[in-house]
Amino acid sequence: MGREIFRCGHWTFGEVIRTLPGMFDFDGLFAELRDEGDDGWSDLLRARCAEALSPGVHGHLAEWTSAVRGLPDIASDGPRVIDGRVTIGSNSDISAEQRETLHSVLRQFCPWRKGPFDLFGIHIDSEWRSDRKWDRLAGHIDLRNCSVLDVGCGNGYYGWRMLDAGARRVVGFDPFLLYVMQHEIVKRYADHPVANYVLPLSDDALQSCPRCFDVTFSMGVLYHRTSPIDHLQSLFRTIKPGGRLVLETLVTDRADAQVLVPEGRYAKMRNVWFIPSIRMLELWLKRTGFDDVKVVDVTATSSREQRRTDWMTFESLSDFLDPRDATRTIEGHPAPIRAIATAVARP
C-alpha cells in the first residue's frame, strides 16, 4: 500500500513530506517494519509522524525547514566517530563561504544538548558530553547486527554510536522537533544511506508495539514519567524474548528500597517525579518482566559532563546545585547521581 492512504486529520503522510522535500524520509523504515510483520504498528507510526509534522502543529517548523533548505551541498565522508565526536567531513572539504553558511544554519538550531558533533571542522560542543556516558555503558552491551529502539533519543547522537558499535538499525523516538531537526541536518551529510532514524514521537506510541527489538534503550526518561511502572512495562513490550534493556536514570544513594519524590522541583526541573534507590530500581525491573538485572555503572553527574557551552548558553548543572554545597541541589535534594542498568526480557 502507498503512503498516501495514511491520513491524519486533513493531511496524509505523503502530503506532509511533499512540503518538506528531502527530509523525514521514513519510508524505508516503514517498509522494513511491514515486511517484518509489524504492519499495524508501522501504520500507526506513519500516522503519528504525519500528525507531528503537519503544517501548523509547531510554530517554528516552517522556519526550520527553510533554514535546512539553505544548507550548502557538500560531498562528504562519514559519519565516523573520532575522540567521541560524531564526525562528518573535514575543514578542507568546504570553502570559507560554505563554512560560514553551515555555521550560521547550525546556530539556528541551538541549544545542542547531546553530542559532541564535528561537521566539516565545525565542532558542536554540546551541553552534555554524551560520549562519557557511552563510554561507561558500551562494554556492557553487544549491539552487533541488532535492531535497536532508543526512547527519548534526543538528536540521535547515541544512534550514531550504536551503528558504529555494529547495530543493524536504530529507531529513535523523541517528541521535541528541534532535536529531530538537528538529526536531519547531520543525516543530510552522511555519505551513504544510514539506518539511524529519529521519529518525532514519544513513548505513548509504544503501546501497540510488537516485541520486535533486540535491544531497547531508555536513557534519562524514567524519572520524567508520572508512572515509572507504566514506562518500564511499555519498554518490555518492545523487546524480543531474551532481548535486552539498557536503562539509565537518576537514582538516590540510599541502600534500601526507597524512592525520592520531590515536593516541588528537582534541580530546577518541574517534571521529576520518582527517583529510586538502586535496590528499588532493581525491584521495579523484576516486577515488570526483566531478569538478570545488572547495575553496571553509578556515577555522580559533574560539570565535566554537563555544562554551558557556546552551543547551549542556558542554565546547566552548575546553576542547579547549591552554590555553597555541590552535593545538594538548589532545593536541598541530593545532587544528581545516575545509574545504568541492563536486564533481559522474559519470554
Image: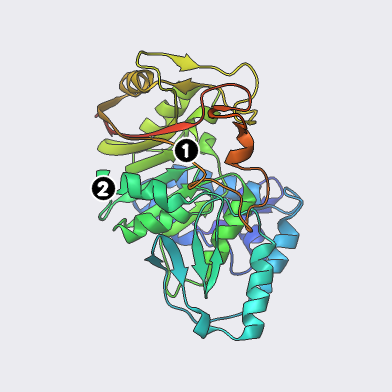
What mark, if any, has residue 139 been given in the picture? Answer: 2
SS at mark 2 in the image:
helix
Taking the image as shown, residue 73 lies to the left or right of residue 247, namely right
Residue 17 vertical position relative to residue 176 in the rendered view, above or below? below
Q: Report crowding for label 1: few under 14, some 14 to 19, many 20 or more residues within 10 A (C-alpha).
A: some
Q: Position of residue 253 (x, y in %)?
A: 41, 22
Q: Nearer the viewer, residue 319 or 200?
A: 319
Q: Amino acid at mark 1?
A: Thr
Nearer the viewer's eye, disc 1 or disc 2? 1
**Amino acid type, callout 2:** Gly
Distance CA(mark 1)–CA(mark 2)? 20 Å
**Residue furthest front as drawn:** 324
Find residue 184 and report its image quarter: bottom right
Secondary structure at numbered mark 1: loop
The location of residue 300, given as percent across then percent down, is 43, 35
Residue 340 position (above or below residue 272): below
Looking at the image, residue 227 lies above or below residue 94: above
Residue under label 1: 301
